[in-house]
Amino acid sequence: MALASNPAPRMIRHLDPLWRRLITPLAFVGFAVAALTIGALFAPMTRLISPDRATAQRRTRHLVRLTCRAYLASLRHARLIDYRVSGIDRLAGGGRLLLANHPTLLDALFLLAYTPNANCIVKGPLARHPVTSGVIRAAGFITNRRPCATFKAACRALRGGQSLIVFPEGTRSTPGQPVRLRRGGAAIAVTSRTAVTPVRIRCRPSTLTKGEPWYRVPPRRPDFRIEVGRPLPSTVPSPTTQEAVGDLTQRLETYFNRPHKG
């Protein structure tokens, strides 16, 4: 007589999307609470006990790093996402220029979670948003409101030993389309003579993409793969700075668009 199949795994598969729909709003609330707590409570305390502004910013970034790691771990524990980060050792030390593709809303959190003393270039609206403005200001993150000032601040941060996170697409990727980069990230690398640490981010199935509502839950748990690549030299044999920037941008586009292994 044939044994009856166990219905438990099938039931879990049916309940998993429902669970993720119920818990997703709480995850966004948790992010808001964490950002507000750092910006409104811990950052002012850090400024009071720090000898100077640079030390306060560095300590705030360390707190941001720990908070991002804890937040991502909580998302994994709640079965909202899964993830694997490879090449973490390439993020150690200071003065790294991280250029990454940008498929989802969570990308910056992964890089901030694993990069010591990380600065980043953020959009102006985030710097003015009541939830994120306090922590962005306290950490000394760079806003992109004025391109010339942003460029100078980015080069200054790298010279000061900070690692810098840049998404050279300028916005989230369009799903299913090749990665197309603006020249700003390569220009920072060439001008500051900093090697590029490329980071490729993949998410299957896609979620929190450009134009997608935050409450739209994919049919199965998203699986993130973050691959920190070997440094790419920013100096190339080009006769002019503009040509060097163009060459580096093209090399990076080729890197981000090559097929993923596995």
Image: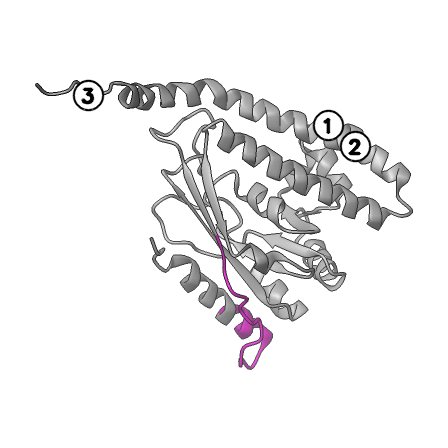
Mark 2 is surrounded, within 10 Å at the Cα level, by few (under 14), some (14 to 19) or many (20 or more) other residues, namely some
Where does residue 178 sit, x and y in percent of width and height?
37, 53
Q: Residue flagged by tag 3: what amino acid is it? A: Ser
Q: CA distance from mark 2 to mark 3?
A: 53 Å
Q: Which mark is residue 5?
A: 3
Q: Nearer the viewer, mark 2 or mark 3?
A: 3
Q: Which residue is mark 1?
A: 37
> Which tag, 2 or 3, sits closer to the chain's start?
3
The quarter of the image holding the N terminus is top left
Q: Is residue 125 visible?
A: no
Q: Which residues are magenta?
A: 227-246
Q: Residue at x 65, y 49 (%)?
A: 120
Could you tell me if residue 230 is visible in this image? yes
N-terminal label among 1 and 3: 3
**x, y percent for residue 74:** 55, 30
The residue wearing badge 2 is 42
CA distance separating discs 1 and 2? 7 Å
